[in-house]
Image (spheres, rainbow, N blue to C red):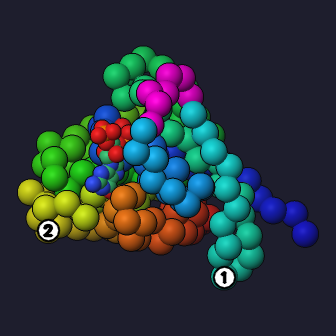
Amino acid sequence: MSTSLIKVVIAGDGSVGKTSLIRRYTEGKFDISRTATIGVDFHTHTVDLPDGQIRLSIWDMAGQERFKIVRPGLYRGSQATALVYDVTAPASLEHLHSWREEILAAVPDQKFIVVGNKIDLERTQEPGPARRFAEAIKAPYLETSALTGEGVTDMFISLAQTAMRG
Ligand code: G3D
Ligand code: MG
């Protein structure tokens, strides 16, 4: 039986925790001393779904948050995007609109999930507006902590299922 390979993108402002979420999921750990990544960073990981396994190729913006010009090329061929914000940084939620617009310009039929990260910290952004945003764009809404691991497996399962959705 062959395993399909699905490309997914993790997008959102710098420092919302994208790299930490991917590390937590693919390596099962939270790296305190992280190295600044330049260029494209991607990880491949097998996900078990009720209907079988799929391989996710997970593309991290890896410092490209600042380089708008190169981003459209990174989105090409992807089937779903996680729009990640930080529940302690309300501006990062506001910016998800423009992340979504940019991705849709490159991949018009893109499907999304919305993720609020850093729930181990004291939140300054209530989940209501994020839930409404997710509902409006027909995206699942999840919350995570890359630090404790809470919600992280669910996030990637949801992303895989969203990518597989017809
Ligand atoms: P990015 O890839 O979106 O830019 P990073 O974000 O994964 O590099 O994380 C940015 C900072 O937030 C890092 O701290 C990281 O340790 C921290 N972080 C990421 N996820 C969480 C989380 O769920 N909870 C908490 N408490 N911190 C988190 P530094 O200090 O290295 O900048
Ligand atoms: Mg990063």
Which tag, 2 or 1, sits closer to the chain's start?
1
- Does 52 sit left or right of 158 as displayed? right
Q: What residue type is disc 2 on?
A: Gly
Q: How many marks?
A: 2
Q: Which residue is mark 1?
A: 50
Residue nearest the viewer, comparing 75 with 28: 28
Part of the protein shown in magenta: 34-40
Residue at image x 66%, y 66%?
47
**Magenta highlight on residue 36:** yes
Residue nearest the viewer, comparing 114 with 103: 114
Residue at image x 67%, y 73%?
48
Q: Which mark is residue 136?
A: none
Q: Position of residue 131 (x, y in %)?
A: 22, 67
Q: Is residue 82 visible?
A: yes
Q: Position of residue 38 (x, y in %)?
A: 50, 22
How many residues crowd around disc 1 within 10 Å: few (fewer than 14), some, or many (20 or more)?
few
Q: What residue type is disc 1 on?
A: Pro
- Does 22 sit left or right of 15 as displayed? right
Secondary structure, mark 2, is: helix
Residue nearest the viewer, comparing 68 with 104: 68
Q: Position of residue 105 (x, y in %)?
A: 42, 34
Q: Which residue is mark 2?
A: 128
In the orientation shown, which residue stands out farthest toward the front?
A: 33
**Magenta highlight on residue 162:** no
- Does 2 sit left or right of 33 as displayed? right
Q: What secondary structure is the stretch in magenta mostly built from?
A: loop
Q: Is residue 22 visible?
A: no
Residue nearest the viewer, comparing 69 with 149: 149
